[in-house]
Amino acid sequence: MLFTGRITANAEVRTIKGDKQVTNFTVALNQRYKTKAGEKKEKTAYVNCSYWVNPGLAVYLTKGAVVEIAGWVEAQTWTQQDGTVKADLICSVDNVKLFGSTAAKADETPKAKKAEKKAVAAGGGDDDDDLPF
């Protein structure tokens, strides 16, 4: 399944069985629509995601970030102590595409980011005389 939504809280990395790591996060899917009477409505579904490939991605999966997720989705049900049945949507993530992140390092300002990009685009130094063109 392929879906796009916003991350509801910063991703957490857990270590399982010694050396395996999993990144867990939740994505909110919003649907806006109008009823026949013209009334505006909104529904939200939450999908609990588990990403097993790269735990380093967790620093980018911050609250409010827009992501596109590809993976296997299934419903998981359980019965509470009072007898009511609850359900969750669980996604085993194969691929994550990050569209926007709210993560900003405290020591990195927008001007510093621009200067860094400019230096990389210019070749990274003053020794540009050996270019082949």
Image (tube, helix red, strand yellow):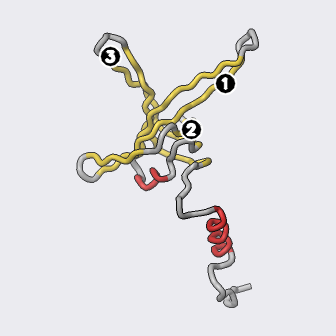
Where's residue 78, x and y in %? 34, 20
Give the spatial CA distance, label 2 vs label 3. 28 Å
Q: Sequence order check: which comes first, mark 2 or mark 3?
A: 2
Q: Is residue 75 left or right of residue 128?
A: left
Instruction: Please report whichever mark, 1 or 3, sits nearer to the chain's N-terminal start.
Output: 1
Pointer 2 or 1: first along the chain:
2
The kind of residue on which mark 1 rests is Arg
Q: SS class of the residue under badge 2? A: strand
Look at 37% across and 21% down and name the residue there. 77
Check the picture and name the quadrant holding the C terminus: bottom right
Pointer 2 local density, CA inside 10 Å: few below 14, some 14–19, many at least 20? many
Q: Position of residue 8 (x, y in %)?
A: 51, 37
Residue 6 sits in which quadrant?
top right
Location of residue 31 with respect to 22 vertically, above or below: above
Q: Which residue is mark 2?
A: 6
> Please, what is the three-letter code of the amino acid marked with disc 2?
Arg
Q: Residue at x 30, y 48 (%)?
A: 15
Looking at the image, residue 37 lies above or below residue 117: above
**Mark 1 residue element:** strand
Crowd band around label 3 with a 10 angstrom C-alpha radius: few (<14), some (14–19), many (20+) = few
* Residue 89, image x, y percentages: 45, 28
Question: Relative to 27, is 115 above or below?
Answer: below
Q: Position of residue 13 (x, y in %)?
A: 37, 48
In the picture, the disc for residue 79 is 3
In this rendering, the count of numbered labels is: 3
The image quadrant that residue 36 belongs to is top right
Q: Secondary structure at mark 3?
A: strand
